């Protein structure tokens, strides 16, 4: 279907930061995409406009009741200059699953993909090409109806902003140290833990702040009921190599179904490596560490890609994993995922979409 997306080009272009100094989410491109929703009309007025502040009614529901969802996906500049998106279909269908959970109206995924295509092409000079860099794409929906009654909003805005990024962690792909959180809980099954919504991240800030004071990059969450099964790490899903098997927590209803998580599981199985998606308790992990069978740990996420975990701190005892250095499997996965994304490796699953 042909979609009409209005365009208002930016009057001037911002200077671009040097690619080696990008960091994560600090620079934004010249344009953004917006589209509004009104009950009775549906989504309307898709448009690409200059990057700009929002003017909003202070009574907008998003400020009070947090009715909002977001996604995080990436575009890459391949060696031959082509710009390509990594699994946009998986991200957009997850966004619609988050919408269902947060009572936000569904998006037409094809229209949003076309909007992404046009927006990224408008800002194509911003897509970095050096090793470890990409254009991070942040679509988000906010409830804009100015009304304080607690009920789903009747008005929304979808906004997409773009940010050229380098590594998410200051450590780059060096192993991060993670604190296993004993007290606070991120989410419970039946709640919104499986949705990509801001409240899940806000709920994690206190624990992250405390862990960071102790020198840890992130926290690892345990389940909210038994307080013993591993769920995920602040901004990543998590994997453990136990002997010859790779184990990752099953999607229990409180864990985000990561697109990189799914990609890593598929790659491992494609390579003939056994992967188990199951419950994994912290006790089993500590026991495996003691027995010497916990060989590697790593997190996966769009922002973090594949990030080795060099140490888990549990109940005051640091569990150093794999000598605290990047494990062979984490490195192989990082190279495979980034190789597919940058076009230097073949793409056996057809994940990349050329713009
Ligand atoms: C992502 O990996 O895209 C995420 O959403 C994590 C993030 C909150 C930085």
Image: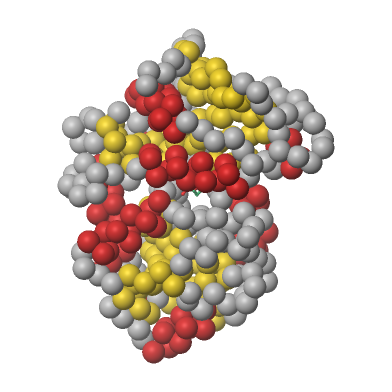
Name of the residue lying farthest toward the bottom: 291
Q: 331 left or right of 287?
A: left
31 is higher (above) or lower (below) than 158: above
Task: Depth check: give the residue in front, 342 or 217.
Answer: 342
Quadrant of the rendered image containing residue 354: top left
Q: Name the residue nearer the viewer: 224 or 14.
A: 224
Q: Nearer the viewer, residue 67 or 174?
A: 67
Residue 355 horizontal side relative to residue 186, left or right: left
Q: Residue at x 29, y 52 (%)?
A: 337
Which residue does the image show at 58% across and 70% down from the upper left? 222
Q: Nearer the viewer, residue 247 or 320?
A: 247
Q: Position of residue 147 (x, y in %)?
A: 80, 31
Quadrant occupied by the C terminus:
top left
Q: Which coloring applies here?
A: secondary structure
Return the x and y of residue 204 as percentages of the image width and height.
Answer: 63, 57
- Residue occupying the point 51% across, 41% down: 96
Q: Based on the displayed image, in which of its 4 quarters is residue 99 positioned?
A: top right
Whole-percent x, y for residue 171 in the image: 42, 56
Across the whole image, how many numbered discs are drawn on residues? 0
Left or right, 143 with respect to 326, comes to: right
Residue 166 visible? no
Q: Quadrant of residue 84?
A: top left
Q: Quarter holding the N terminus? A: top left
For residue 115, above or below residue 66: above
Residue 75 visible (yes or no): yes
Which x, y percent locates residue 345? 18, 48
- The residue that appears at 44% across and 64% down in the rendered structure is 238
In the displayed image of the protein, which residue is found farthest to the front? 40
């Amino acid at each position: 279907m042909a979609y009409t997306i209005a365009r208002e080009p930016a009057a001037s272009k911002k200077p671009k930061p040097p690619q080696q100094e990008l960091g994560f989410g600090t620079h934004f491109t010249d344009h953004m995409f917006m589209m509004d929703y009104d009950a009775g009309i549906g989504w309307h007025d898709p448009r690409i406009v200059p990057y700009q502040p929002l003017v909003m009614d202070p009574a907008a529901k998003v400020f009070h009741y947090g009715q909002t969802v977001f996604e995080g996906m990436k575009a890459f500049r391949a060696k031959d200059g082509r710009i390509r998106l990594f699994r946009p279909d998986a991200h957009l269908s997850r966004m619609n699953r988050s919408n269902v959970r947060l009572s936000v109206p569904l998006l037409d995924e094809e229209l949003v993909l076309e909007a992404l295509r046009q927006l990224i092409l408008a800002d194509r000079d911003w897509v970095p090409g050096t090793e470890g860099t990409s254009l991070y794409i942040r679509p988000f929906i906010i409830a804009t109806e100015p009304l304080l009654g607690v009920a789903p909003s009747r008005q929304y805005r979808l906004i997409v902003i773009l940010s050229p990024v380098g590594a998410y962690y200051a450590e780059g792909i060096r192993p991060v140290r993670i604190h296993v959180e004993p007290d606070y809980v991120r989410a419970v099954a039946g709640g919104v833990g499986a949705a990509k919504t801001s409240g899940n991240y806000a709920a994690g800030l206190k624990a992250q702040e405390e862990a960071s004071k102790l020198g840890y990059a992130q926290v690892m969450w345990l389940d909210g009921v038994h307080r013993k099964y591993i769920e995920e790490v602040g901004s990543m899903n998590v994997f453990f190599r136990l002997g010859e098997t790779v184990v990752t927590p099953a999607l229990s209803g409180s864990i985000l179904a990561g697109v990189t998580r799914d990609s890593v599981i598929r790659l491992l199985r494609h390579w003939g490596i056994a992967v188990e998606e199951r419950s994994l308790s912290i006790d089993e992990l500590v026991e495996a560490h003691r027995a010497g069978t916990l060989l590697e740990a790593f997190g996966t996420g769009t922002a973090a890609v594949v990030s080795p975990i060099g140490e888990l701190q549990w109940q005051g005892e640091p569990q150093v994993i794999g000598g605290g250095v990047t494990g062979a499997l984490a490195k192989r996965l990082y190279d495979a995922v980034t190789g597919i994304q940058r076009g230097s490796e073949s793409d056996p699953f057809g994940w990349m979409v050329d713009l």
